[in-house]
Image: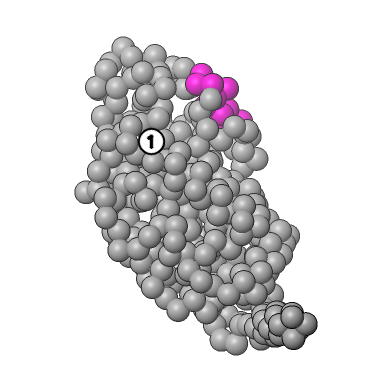
Amino acid sequence: MNKAINAIVAIAMTSFAAGSTLAQEYPQKPIRLVVGFTAGGISDVLARAIGAKLSAGIGQQVVVDNRVGAGTTIASDLVAKAPPDGYTLFMQDITTHAINATLYKKLPYDTVKDFTPISLVAASPLLLLVHPSLPVKSVKELIALAKSKPGQIVYASSGNGTILHLSAETLKSMAKIDMVHVPYKGSAQAVQGLLGGEVAVSFSTMPPALPQVKAGRLRAIGVTTPKRNTAAPDVPTIAEAGLPGFNIVLYSGVLGPAKLPAAVVAKLNSELAKAVNSPDVKAIYATLGVDPLTDTPEQFTAHIASEIEKLGKAVRAAGAQVD
């Protein structure tokens, strides 16, 4: 019996030593951080800010790799099928997992089983925007106008089933109004459509919208989070402006392929926390209206499961379908 116990202890000590050695040795070459969105979008900007700081912390270059297409499923599939060695990571957001798990009837990967959650890295609101020609200056006024003109107000989104589409559908449902949906290919294009007067209303991520709002070319009448945002302190939350309970937060995090070694996950989690909470990255976040956010891999795993359930309901309620 003592021999058996000694053998188990020896195996455990060897595994621990191997894990510790792996953590100390990793990384030995550049790391690819895959983003499923175009350059200039919020996921890309966050990835580049975090990647630059992470590079300094781990002593290896972090290369951002934009793999656009099929509603981020191309990028997701690439990471899901990558070797679990820590050299291919994924900039995940609310679309890649929480929405796509329900939006797509069939995916070439398992949204939960084929990934290793490492850490959340950011949380940000969406802005509810209107064209200046629309005679509304608040959420209550928009709702009143939409009720007086059912089916006549047109709103933009970044595509069917995207968070911008689901946010507008949630607004419609909660306010009991009818607006017409025009999907664009990306949030920047949706903002351009709004600027051009092709549509009257749109939700948007902060980066493409804030400069237009500050220049007076667009009017922001609400933010989707429970609290006001420091980058737009004068814009009320949608909840306080007329729809109590309205709460949509755009989360971003970093994942790896399934079966990523625990020692690598622990090291990346620690280094990501340092990067996200560094003064340099916090300063960039502040200009984007983004809040720094970190957690444990276990908490991130639970968060993904919760968001899949929450956004899955929104997808089904909206009747959203992939183009």
> What residue is disc 1 on?
314
Residue sitting at x 32%, y 36%: 316
**Vertically, is 164 above or below 246?**
below
- Region in magenta: 234-244
* The one of 181 and 257 positioned closer to us in this rendering: 257
Q: In which quarter of the image is the N terminus?
A: bottom right
Residue 273 in picture, x, y percent from top left: 69, 62
Residue sitting at x 58%, y 63%: 118
Residue 109 in picture, x, y percent from top left: 35, 63
Within 10 Å of the Cα at label 1, are there few (<14), some (14-19), or many (20+) other Cα atoms?
many
User: Is-magenta flag for residue 243?
Assistant: yes
**Vertically, is 57 above or below 184?**
below
Residue 192 in picture, x, y percent from top left: 34, 45
**Vertically, is 8 above or below 75?**
below
Residue 121 image-quadrant placement: bottom right
Tell me if 291 is positioned left or right of 112 in this view.
right
Tell me if 220 is positioned left or right of 120 in this view.
left
Residue 12 image-quadrant placement: bottom right
From the image, give the main secondary structure of the stretch colored magenta.
loop
In this orientation, does residue 38 appear? Answer: no
